[in-house]
Amino acid sequence: MKSYLYFIILVLCFNPKAYSQTESVLKDFVNPSTFSDLTLTSPNGGEFWQVGKIPSISWESNNLSNDVTLEYSIDDGSTWTNIATVSNVTSSYAWSVPNDVSKAGLVRVTSGTLTDASDSVFEISDDDSTCNIVVIGSSTAEGLGASTIENSWVYKYNEALFQKNTMLNVVNLGLGGLTTYDLLPTESSTVLPPGVTIKTDRNITKALSYNPIAIILNLPSNDTYNGYSTSTQLTNFAEINSEATNSSVPIWITTTQPRYFSELADVQTQIDVRDAILNTYTDKALDFWTDIAENDGTILSNLNSGDGTHVNDVGHGILLDKVMVENIEDLTSVGDPLNDDRAIGENVSTKLHHNLR
């Protein structure tokens, strides 16, 4: 279909008089209700999928008349093996990757005369290693503000990484209400405020117990809400960061995030901590303020979940994009992948099971 459309556009460019004869045909091509189309979106080349894991084959389509047949090849398309035939109104299929090890894998989708295959090869591997990325933090990490947990940035991050490389697994230790004090190392000598205890099931020490390739720390505003000063917050961030770096684990620290505060001093604290994180942690700082905040330090109205504290689905999507561009998953190429069955698919607070879709 696309080739015919390009041809028509070229004809019109070189022969404008042809417009009257082709106008109705062109309208048929550009009107989604009048043509059929089928495009495979995943796997589309470069993926690393492990035998027995269950990533999703996905595609986009318009006005299909026939069911969709799914096939795979392990020899770059020379031969094809059937996977399944599914309804033409579906757009994905949870595929249990077969024990057909290959670095020349392709997937093909077909409906009637329409067909599309992976643009380039992907790998099917019998390597059963797991590489964990651990997220620690508070309510935004946990997923609050999103309409469903599936729309939260950590959940979608886990899904996106798993689709690219089934070796990757995100362990989410985030829980609403936590502060920098809660996430300090278990053996920290820091004097804690009255009534505060280090959360040993959520803190940096717990994160390191998963032998992660990386850690992401996401604490948007609870420290300021609890009256902790800029210097206190930065001291605690530094201790958490040192615990990770002393274990040779890279850690990314998100900035503060916008939130409604009645006191301007609190807004200024949020801004001061934001700036300090960006200046201190530089390439390991994630800017969770820009594109999210109004000039007054509140959440942009179109991103506010309604409580003045948490971002909505669109906001979580923006946070996801900011994390994805860091390509933290590329650390899987450093050293040997780690096996840790405890962490596979685990999300302590929201029970993310990436192989149960």
Image (cartoon, grey):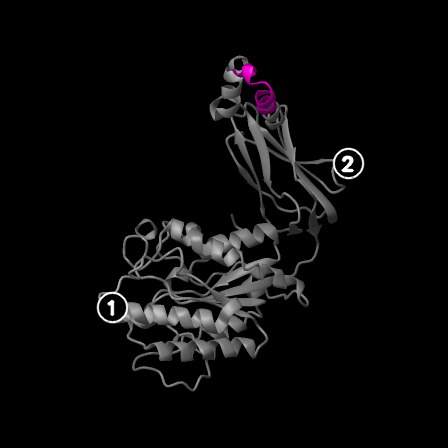
- In the depicted structure, whether residue 166 falls above or below residue 209: above
Q: Residues within 10 Å of mark 1 (few under 14, many from 20)?
A: few
Which quadrant of the view contains residue 310? Answer: bottom left
Query: Where in the figure is residue 282, as x and y percent of width and height?
Result: 50, 69
What is the quadrant of residue 92 in the picture? top right
Residue shown at 46%/78% (left/top)?
Answer: 238
**Which residue reaches farthest top?**
21
Residue extending furthest left? 262
Which span is picked out in magenta?
8-19
Using the image as rendered, state which of residue 293 and residue 334 is in the foreground: 293
N-terminal of the two: label 1 or label 2? 2
The dot on residue 357 is: none
Q: Which residue is mark 2?
A: 78
Residue 262: % across, % down: 22, 65
Q: Amino acid at mark 1?
A: Leu
In depth, the one of 111 and 87 nearer the eye is: 111
Kind of residue at disc 2: Ser
> Is 10 covered by the magenta stretch?
yes
Q: Which mark is drawn over residue 264?
A: 1
